[in-house]
Image (tube, rainbow, N blue to C red):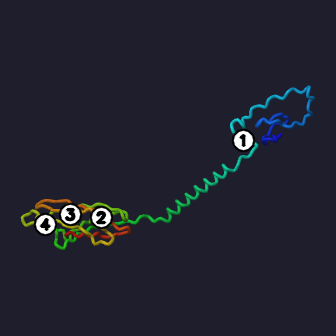
Amino acid sequence: MLCPHCGGSNPDGAAYCQFCGSALATSAAPLPSSLAPPPPPPPPSPWRAGGLAPPGRRRSGVGRTVLIVLVIFIAIILVASVISYLVVPAPANVEIIGVNFQSPDDVCGLNGAVDSSYYNTTAGQSFSLSYELSGNNTTSGGTAACEVNSVSTPTAGFSLSGTNVPLAIPENSTQILSFTVNPPGSSFTGVLTLILT
């Protein structure tokens, strides 16, 4: 038997709805009022007390709508992630396969010197280099004093910063020449040329 008030399903012959406590219409003939016992009070409804809906009632579609929106949102994020992974190219590499030193006035005997080290970095990512320098060899077996006043590079796309020049190198001694190499923002493979004066 269905409750006309809340729609909850009740056993046949029940006088009150077990969900909301409303009186149910019965098909039995009513007893004369003098013989009929007073009706018992309705039992407490667990459904109304806890704020729950009776099992036979349908809830609103708000929960389902929220779930659908959430699933669509997650799907959009996943699709955007896959697209960005496929579209965004891998960072370009800069490979320096050697460093050539040029010095028109042969500062510290460095004109034509070569550093055959291999340097690999990501395009646009700066890195530091340092070299231990000494003066020109002398006939007496030592090295002469010398001074590096500037360091630059003509290699396309490259620049230098943070050079510790002027750098004076005393006789029979060494000093560290250091600087930061700023590579281009695109791929490069080749030799980096440094000009010292």
Rendered image: mark on residue 136: 4
Residue indicated by mark 2? 181
**Sequence-earlier tag: 2 or 4:** 4
Choose mark 1 or mark 4, whichever is in front. 1
Location of residue 112 in the rendering, given as x and y in whole percent from the top left corner:
20, 71
Give the tally of numbered discs: 4
Q: Amino acid at mark 4?
A: Asn
**Sequence-earlier tag: 1 or 2:** 1
Q: Amino acid at mark 1?
A: Ala
Label 1 to label 2: alpha-carbon separation: 71 Å
**Sequence-earlier tag: 1 or 4:** 1
Determine whether label 2 and label 4 are within 8 Å by CB.
no
- Name the image quarter holding the N terminus: top right
Q: Regarding mark 4 in the picture, which secondary structure is present there?
A: loop
Q: Residue at x 24, y 63 (%)?
A: 163
Q: Residue at x 54, y 61 (%)?
A: 80
Label 1 to label 4: alpha-carbon separation: 95 Å
Mark 2 neighbour density, 10 Å: few (under 14) some (14–19) many (20 or more):
many
